Image (spheres, rainbow, N blue to C red):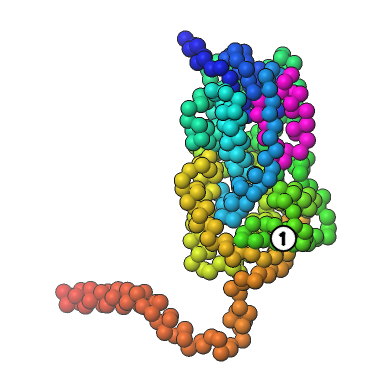
Amino acid sequence: MVSKPKKVKKIVLAYSGGLDTSVILPWLRETYNCPVIAFAAELGQGQELEGIRKKALASGASKCIVADLRQEFAQDYLWPMLRCGAVYEERYLLGTSIARPLIAKHQVAVAKAEGADAVAHGATGKGNDQVRFELTYMSLAPELQIIAPWKDDRFGLRSREAALEYAREHGIAVDATKKKIYSRDRNLWHLSHEGADLEDPANEPREDLWLISRPVSQAPDKPQYVSIDFVKGSPVALNGKKMLAWKLLEQLNKLAGRHAVGQSDLVENRLVGIKNRGAYETPGGSVLYEAHRALESITLDRDTAHYKQQLALRYAELVYYGKWFSTLRRALDAFVNVTQQNVTGRVKMKLFKGRATVAALSSPYSLYVTELASFTMGSEYQPKDAIGFIRLFGLQQKIQAQLSKSGRAEKSSAKRKKK
C-alpha cells in the first residue's frame, strides 16, 4: 500500500537543469501539490546555466533563484582543501564532493527566506551526493523536511532512459539523449563523466569524452610555462597578475586544459560501499596541487609535513563523505592554517603533454640551505657528528640483534649438553 505524501507547503529544489532535476521538478509539483522553487548555483558551469530560469519556470517552478557562488566556492571551499592537500584515494581531487555542501548551504538559506518547509535534491539512492546534501541540511536546518525522489517508491523513474521518456512526454527540454547519456558534473574545479560505456572498466575512455581539456594526442608539441604566486598557502596571482580566486582558476583551467593536464580515469570506493568508475578533468586544480606541494617542500619542516600528510587523508574523507560542516573539519582547518603561515612564494610550472611539473621554486621563508644540501663538505655540517647520532638512533636495533644472537647461542649450547 502506497502511503500518502506528507503535506508540505513549499519546496526548494537544488536545480541544475540537467536530466534528473528537470524531471524531478514537475514530479514534485504533481506529487506534493505545492509550489516548488528551483535553486541553481553558479559554480563555473559555463554555458550550462544559460536559459536556466526560463527552463525551470517552463517545467513548473513557481520561482527560479540563481546565485553566483564562484568566488565563495574558490576562496572558502577550494582553497582550504588545496591548503590541506586533500586527495581521495590518491587520485580524486574531490570536485563534485566539495561543491555539494556549498549548494546545500545556500539552498537552506533560500528555504528560510522563502518560508519553505522542505528541501529536495536529485541525487540517486546509490551515490554519494545524497549523503552530502542531506548531511548539510541536517547540520544547518534540521527542522526542514528532506525530499529525495529517487528513494521514494512513488518515483517510478529508475533509469536515465525512463527519465528521458518522462521528459519527452511532459515536453521538458533536456540535453541528454539515449546516444549521449553520460552523467556529468561541472564546476570551476572539474568536470566529471560517469555512466554509459564508462560503467565497464574494460572500456578505455574515448578521446571525444574530454570537454574542457584536449586529448593528450592533440596537446601542443611545445611546453608552456606558468607561474603561480601563493600567500599563506592560497594562490593569489597567475603569471604575476593578481586576480580573484575564481578568475585565477578559470584562466589556469584554459592554460592547463590546452596541454591535456588533469585527466584521470579511476575506480573509487563510494561511501555507500559500491565501486564506481569515473573519468575526471581537473586541469587547473592539478597544477595548483603540484605547485602547492612543491612550495610546502621548501617551507615546512619534516615533522609538520609528515603529520600534515596523515591529516590530509582524513580531511579528504570528510569532504568525500559530506561532513564539511563538522567540528572535525573545522578543527583540521585550524591546524592546516597554522602550517600555512610560511607557505608563501612563487612556483614556476611546466605544462606539457598531460603533465604539470615543477620548473622553479622560490620563497622568502625557504628552509632549503644550498650549503647544507651540497655534496661539498663545509663548516656548517661536521660529518663526524653523525657517528654519535647514528649510534644512538640505531641503539635499540643493535641491542635486539645482540640479545637475539645471545639467545640463539644459549639454545645451541643447551642442545649440545643434552647430547
Quadrant of the image occupied by residue 400: bottom left
Observer-nearest of 397 and 146:
146
Q: Is residue 408 left or right of residue 291?
A: left
Q: Which residue is mark 1?
A: 228
Q: Is residue 290 above or below residue 215?
A: below
Residue 52: horizontal and vertical position, in percent? 74, 28
Determine the secondary structure under disc 1.
Answer: strand
- Tell me, yes or no, whether the highlighted magenta stretch contains residue 9: no
The residue at the point 64 percent across, 49 percent down is 75
Residue type, label 1: Ile
Residue pictured at 70% horizontal, 51% vertical: 245
For this orientation, the residue located farthest to the right is 221
Please count the marks in the image: 1
**Quadrant occupied by the C terminus:** bottom left
Instruction: Please tell me whether residue 267 is drawn above or below residue 310 in the rendered image.
Output: above
| Mark 1: few/some/many CA within 10 Å (<14, 14-19, 20+) | many
Say if residue 347 shows up in the picture. Answer: yes
Residue 274 position in % (x across, y down): 53, 36
Magenta residues, as a range?
Answer: 38-58
